[in-house]
Image (cartoon, rainbow, N blue to C red):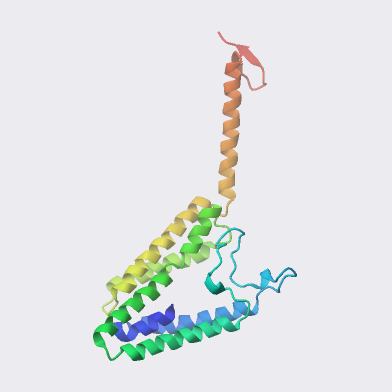
Amino acid sequence: MRRGRIFYYPGARFDTALLVQSFFMIATQLMLLKIALDHRPAPSSKGGEAAVPFLAAREGQWDRQRPYNFWQWRSPKPYWQFLLYLFIGLMAMELMLAPFHGLYGFYSSLLGYIGLSVEATLPLPQMLANSRSRSCKGFRFSVLASWLAGDAMKMFWFFTSVTEIPWAFKLCGIFQAGCDIFLGVQYLMYGNGEAGRGHQTIMSTLGAGTSKHSNGRASGGWGTPTGRRTPDH
């Protein structure tokens, strides 16, 4: 929703650096989209499911069908058509509502909050995936560190800048920073999955030892390291 941030600018007049960043991010995301579409797996022999882009990585996760298969189209053309129609629609709304200052102010603010909220919720799928698998395998620590560092610098700038920073940026930035911190907590808790399995193994071993100890007492004696029992006194 970087386009929403750009169309938010005429009504909010926020810091120009944020506007420039939006243009750079749109260009980057368009290139990434093209790369993702160009390097999709080839269709499989049983219907080509492997060629459907942006499918869930694990079976049973996000298995609900999207309306009109949104953003899972097999042909690259609908992606570019959707982005073009979105741009045309936003431009048309901008031109139609601009003469009505009161209505335009509300529309601009609403557009800004929607666009920034969508951007702020980007960590949520990763958080849910980590929680379901109880593992952060495949999620690089360098990515997490860069996100947290970016959040720290962004929050510092938002609340110390002398230029205009609307509250939409601040609130959505706080939410996204909270999500990234929670991802950090998940990384410490789950790691790449090995720690969880090791913890379960240790607990099962302790449970087995406790069970043997209890059986020894119930049979009328104490268990010894050699497996023999000595009579109770």
Q: Against 92, is 134 above or below?
A: above
The quarter holding residue 88 reads bottom left
Q: Quadrant of the N terminus?
A: bottom left
Give the x, y percent position of residue 25: 46, 80
Whether residue 81 can be seen here: yes
Q: Residue furthest right?
A: 45
Left or right, 224 with respect to 113, comes to right
Left or right, 23 with respect to 216, comes to left
Comparing 233 with 183, the one in front is 183
Q: Residue furthest top?
A: 233
Give the x, y percent position of residue 65: 56, 66
Q: Quadrant of the C terminus?
A: top right
Give the x, y percent position of residue 53: 61, 73
The quarter holding residue 204 reads top right
Q: Against 203, is 233 above or below?
A: above
Seen at 48% across and 59% down, the residue is: 127
Q: Residue furthest left?
A: 102
Seen at 57% across and 59% down, the residue is: 61
Left or right, 209 with respect to 96, comes to right
Whether residue 157 can be seen here: no
Left or right, 86 with respect to 13, comes to right
Give the x, y percent position of residue 143: 51, 66
Seen at 60% across and 68% down, the residue is: 55
